[in-house]
Structure formats: structure tokens, C-alpha cells
Image: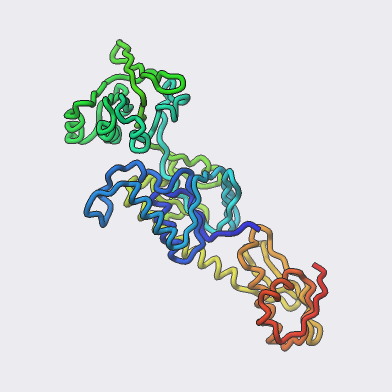
Amino acid sequence: MIAVYDVIIIGGGPAGLTAAIYSARAGLKTLVLEKAAPGGKLGEIPHLENFPGLTQPINGVELAMKMYEQAVKFGAEIRYPEAVVDLDLKGLVKKVRTRSGEYRALSIIIATGLEKKKALKPGEAKLIGKGVSYCAVCDGPIFKGKDVAVLGNSEKAIEEALFLSNLASKVYLITDGEKLEGPEKLIDRLKQQENVKIVDAELKEIVGEERVKSIIVKEKHKEQEIYVSAVFIVKGDEPKTEIFKKAGLELNKIGFLKVNLNQETNIPGVYAAGDCTGRGLQVVVAAGDGAVAALSANKYIKALKAKMRKVEIDEKEGLFYVEIEQGKRAYHRFKIEGKTMKMQSTYTPPEYRGLGIASRIIDAAIKYAKQREIKKLIVECSYVEKWIKNNSDKVSEFEIIYDIKA
């Protein structure tokens, strides 16, 4: 039987880890699925100083590990690397599939952040991991003392070039023919670096077979070959939400997940937080979104479980049942003859097994038998037999006869 979690969080960045801290601390059975390593884009930040409570700058990886450890301390289960490949969000129990298996939960929090945009330059795809990188903080140390290039014209590209200037022998910042954009002080600082050269040219090709050998750039009408060992591409970020759209979630015009102020999506029990919603794009905003999503999920799950705990009885039909949702019912069938109760069969729809519904129904049936002053139980159901063996203290006053038929 597949275990059913209260909440599955897809993504282990600041939004996902904060959601895990809040949900696990609230007592929810929590699973985090992260495709790479805990922390997400925190791992790309060498110095973070605008997060509340910091009196000194902190390395993003260090903050990520603190959040990870805090979530685990409260009981969250975090699995990585484990990428989600498909989702089924229909019904009360949601299904999340990865390459290693299927997971189920009553609620889902999506916190997948953003993906690095590819530059789509000749040679880029075949040399990814062979000198082409999208993260200077992650891979920069590999190329210490070598010549490298940064492709981009944004503030982030400038920051990446400055970071690499402390490691590389020479850094070429290729603007790709675009105007360099960023705070003047940051640009001035870049220009003061003796080992950084700003090249206002278009990148035409990344050259190499087994590893990056050089780049071809075109300035005006003249092409030039620059020998480098690595190319760090900084072309911004974009949401990768196609998998969620396929599962029925609504996106806005530019591909971000649509949520309300409670981080709720258009599907009940499914929430989204952080950069994948397109709001703020800051660590502190992502963390706040994660907290709100977890609080909303907690409220939803409590209401859902309260409904599942409500056991009804239809004496005419001989049924104890829980109306899980419209048209779907878990039940136990019984028959009373004098002071004897026949406990005949128990059924829970397959997708709702593992939630403890059947156990609550049998517990209600036993309480009912005591109220009716039943003396004998004839157990015809194998599930009830197992339940009695695990709850012998609750049935000590009955004579029990086993006649298993189902």
C-alpha cells in the first residue's frame, strides 16, 4: 500500500523549505521532492545580506543548510535528487510521479522556482557540463586560474563576472551586442577589475569537442576568436511550468502559476509559492510565500480530515460509512440478529487507502455494538480480524467467532 502524505512539496528552495518547516511543525506528514540539492537558487548566492535577522552577510549554501536542518528537525522527509515527471491532481488524493516511483498526498505545494534560460548558441547544448555552465558560484571554482567568459548584459551577469574575477586569470564579459545594464556603482566596480574585459559583441559560437576551447564573437562586421576554458551563460530565468499546465493548473500569460493571496491555485488542495508564481523574485518573498502556502494547506487538510472522521450509519441498509466525496464512499457492511452482530465486509476505494478511514469505521461499529448491548461478534471480514488483533482491548467484552468470507 502506498503511503499517503498530508502534503508533498515539489521543490526544495527557500519557498519549499519554509513550507516544509511550517507544515512539519504543524504536525503534517510532509515530503519534499527536490530535483537537485536542497536550497535551490540559494546555492548560487555567494553573499546574502538582505534577509531579515542577518547582521552579517551569509553564504546562500549555509542558509540553505540551516533551513534544511530545521525542516528535518521538525519531521519533514526530504528526498533529493528526485525530479517530478508527472502529476495527477484529480480527486482528493493527489499523485506525484518521479522516475523512482509514485507518491500520494492530500495536498501539494509547488515551489519549483525558475530555470536558467538557454542562450541557444551553436555549440552550447553539446558542451553543457564540459565548460558551458549556468551558475558561476556552482562551477566557477573548477576553472580557477583559467580564462573564462560570461555571456549576458544584466546586473546578474555583472555580479557573476565580479565573482569569477576572484578565481579566474581573465574574465571576458560578452554583452551579446546589448547595452550593459545595472547600477552605475556596480558597472564602475567591474571596469576597475584589471582582469575583466567587457566585450561589446555578439557571441556567434562556442567552440570545442570534449570541452570548451574558445568562443567566436562578432563586433560590428569583424569576427574574433577568444580562447577560454568555460562560458558562463547568464540570460535570465524563466518558469518551467508545462508539467503543471498539463495537470490542469492555470498559468498567467507569461507562464507563471496563478495563485490568490492564500497561495491557492485553481485546484483545491494545490498551492504554489515562490518564484514559480512570478511574485517578488526575492529569497524573503519566496520564504513568506512558502509559509502562507503551508498555513493554507494545514487549514485545508484539517477540514478534510474532519470530514473523513465523520462516520454515518444506515441501519436499514446495514452500513457504517464515510462519504469521502460525492459518489465515493468507504463502508463496512453489518447485520444484527438479536444480540449478535455479523461484521460482513469492509471496503475503501483504492485511491483512499492508507488514510485510516476503514479503521475509524470499524471503531465506530464497535462503539455502536456496545451501545446496542451486543454480546457476540461473528467476524466474516479479514480486515476486521486484523483490526481486532490490533485493538483487543476494545473488544474484550464480546464473544468473538471468526468465519472469514471476505
**Residue at the top extreme of this rendering:** 222
Picture coordinates of residue 364, whole percent (x, y): 65, 77
**Residue at the front extreme of this rendering:** 145
- Report the number of numbered marks: 0
Picture coordinates of residue 317, whole percent (x, y): 76, 74
User: From the image, which quarter does the N terminus lie in?
Assistant: bottom right
Viewer-proximal residue among 320 and 149: 149
- Residue at (55% x, 70% y) in the render: 306
Picture coordinates of residue 345, whole percent (x, y): 76, 70
- Residue at (58% x, 43% y) in the render: 99
Name above or below for residue 91 compared with residue 324: above
Q: Is residue 30 visible?
A: yes
Viewer-proximal residue among 35 and 95: 35
Q: Is residue 270 visible?
A: no
- Residue at (72% x, 65% y) in the render: 347
In-image side of 267 versus 193 (left or right): right
In-image side of 379 versus 242 (left or right): right
Q: Quadrant of residue 339?
A: bottom right
Picture coordinates of residue 166, whole percent (x, y): 25, 33
Q: Quadrant of residue 311?
A: bottom right
User: From the image, which quarter does the C terminus lie in?
Assistant: bottom right
Q: How is the image coloured?
A: rainbow
In-image side of 269 versus 226 (left or right): right
Q: Quadrant of residue 255?
A: top left
- Residue at (64% x, 61% y) in the render: 352
